[in-house]
Image: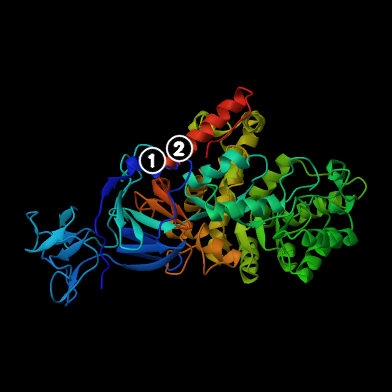
Amino acid sequence: MIRVPRRMRVIAMACIALWSGAGLGAAAPLPTELIIRDVTVIDPSSGQMLDHRSVHIAAGKIIKIEPALVRNASGSIAADGIEVEPALVRNASGSIAADGIEVEPVLVRNASGSIAADGIEVEPARVRKGAGRNASAGPSGPGQGGGTQNNHAAALLVDAERNSDAATVLDGAGKFLIPGLWDMHSHLRDYVEYALPMHIAFGVTGIRDMSGDCPDPKAPAAFCIDDVRQLNSRVSAGTEPGPRVLWASSDFVHGPELRSSLPGTMPKYLYPATAEEGRLVAEHWQARSVDFIKTYNGIPPAAYFALADRARELGIEVSGHVPLGVSTSEAAAHGHKTIEHARSILYDCSDYGPEYRAAMAAVASGVPNANTPDSTERMRRTVNEFDAQRCEAILSDLAKRGVYYTPTHLTRESDARASDAAYRNDPRLKYVIPKWREYWESNLNSAASKSAEVRELYQRFHELGLRVTGMAHAAGVKILAGTDAFDTMIFPGASLHDEFALLHKAGLSPMEVLRTATTNAAEYLGLQRQYGAVREGWTADLVLLNANPLHDIRNTREIAAVIVGGRWYERAQLDGFLRDAERYVEQAKANVAPSVEH
C-alpha cells in the first residue's frame, strides 16, 4: 500500500536557498526521508546501470531502491506509447487508481496530456512518448545535460507532508546517481578551513589523509590525529560541510638525513637509521592510534624492513612512498599495502631499476662516497630501458599480494606540462591561497626552464606511467584514485576529475575509473558493506549528475547535487562553497585574516 502525502509543492531547486534558512554554507536539514525519483542508478560495484529507479534514504542510509514505472499485471507499461514520470496517483477515495495496476508513486496521463482516468487526482509532471528509456539512454557528450556552473534547474524538489513525518523528494529524471567519490591520496594539514567544502562542491565525499598526524602534538596550532577524528565527527553529524576522513596516516617517516627538521621535543629515531629504530617507529605510531604509517623516500632498507615487519606484528598498516633504496617487490613482500605515485613502479619496470635501487640504498644507509644518480640519467634510463616482461612479472606479484596502487598521475603531469600556458592559467587558480600559488609557480618555472631533452623526458616519463597503470589494471592490481591535493596544480576536490581523465587515458573504462574512487576505495578501507555502492543498506553518500559518466568520464564534473549521509547540497549551495573559497583567497592576498561563512 502506498502512503500518500496530504499535499505536495513543486519547487525549482534554484530557489531552495530562499526557504532553507541555513544559507548557502549548510546542507538542507536531514529529512525523515529523502526520495530521488526516476533516476538512473550507476553502481560501480556490480557494474550495473539501472534506469528509472526510486531511491529512498532515511537516517543516512539507502533504505530502498525500486522501479519508478507504472506497470499492469503483465508487466507492460500502463498505457501504450506513454513514458511516465514520477508523481502522485490517487482516486477520489484515496485507494489505488485501478484494479490490476501495480503503482509506484507516479503520474499517468494519456498522449494528449489529459488526465488518464476519471476520478484520478494528479500532480503536474511530464509525459513523454516512447516505451521508456533503456540502459544506453542519456546525454552522449560532455557538454550535454547542463554544466556545473550554468545549470539553472538541477532538479525539482517536492516537499511532501504526511500525518506524522515528511519526505523530501528530488526529481531525478534525466539524471544519473553514483556513489560519493573518494580521493585516496589527499592532505588536510594547513588548509582545512576553506578546502573541505571544496571537496563537496566537486562530489568528493571521502578522503584518505596522507598527513594525518603532526610532528609534535604539543606544538601551538598543530593539526593532529585527534583533530582529524573530531573533524570527521562534525562532518558525520552534519555540523560542518566536508568529506569524511575515515583513514588518516602518521606524520611522514623520513630517513635520518632529515633529522635536523624534527621538532626538538621529538625523539630522533622517528626518522630511523637502524633496524632497532625502525621497530621503535612502528611502536610509536601504533601508540598514537593512527590508521597507518606513512613512509617516505629516504628510509634505509634495514630500518624500513624492520619497521614494516614490526608494524605487521602490531596489526598496523604501512603505506606511502616505497623508499628509494627498496624495490616495490621487496616492499610488497614486507606487507606494504598501497604504493603511492607512478614513479615507484616505473623504476622497477626498467632494466635500470636494480642499479638505481642499489645506489639509493647506499645513499640512505650512509655508505661513504655513495652518490645519488643524476636525475636526467635516472629518467632517461628508466624510460629507455623499460622492459614490459619484467614489468608484467612485478605487477603480477603485486596483484597476488593484494597491494593497491595509487598512481597520482597529476603529480607527473605538472612536470610534463610546465611550459603549457593554458595549463598554467587554469581558472581554478582563484581558489589557491598565495603561499601555495608561489610554491606552484616555483616548481613550474623550474621544470619549464630545463633543456629540451629534459622536458621531453618529463613527457615520456608521464606517458610511461599511464602505460604501466593500464598494465597494472590488466594484471589485477586494484587501482585507487588519488590526487596529492595541493601539490603543484592539484586543486582540492576538483582535480579528482582530472585524475579520472588520466586513468581513462591509461586504458580503464569509465565504469572501471569510477571503481577506483568508489568500490576499490571502500574495499581497501574494509568498508565495502557501507560505502562505494548505490545499494540498499549502504551509507547515503551520493552524487547526482546531469550527464552520463559512462558515455564520457568527464561527465563526473556535471554535478546537480551531492548527498553526504542523507544531507543534500544542491547546486546553488555547491557554488556557494566555491565563492567562499574565492573570497577566502582574496582575503589572504590582502593580508586580511581569512574566514569562511559556513
Identify the residue at horizontal 74%, vertical 69% (top origin): 315
Q: Are marks 1 and 2 in contact (CB under 8 Å)?
A: yes
Identify the residue at horizontal 80%, vertical 42% (top origin): 219
Q: Is residue 55 visible?
A: yes
Say which of 210 and 220 sits in front.
Answer: 220
Q: CA distance from mark 1 to mark 2?
A: 10 Å
> Which residue lies under the disc numbered 2?
576
SS label for mark 1: helix
Q: Say whether residue 305 is left or right of residue 113.
A: right
N-terminal of the pair, mark 1 or mark 2, is: 1
Find residue 596 and name its label.
none
Q: Quadrant of the N terminus?
A: bottom left
- Residue 394, by quadrant, is bottom right
Picture coordinates of residue 560 (x, y %)?
37, 47
Picture coordinates of residue 342 (x, y %)?
62, 52
Q: Say whether residue 63 is left or right of residue 73.
A: right
Q: Name, please, the residue furthest toward the front.
A: 163
Picture coordinates of residue 379 (x, y %)?
68, 44
What amino acid type should be assigned to the residue bearing mark 1? Ala
As drawn, 61 above or below 159:
below
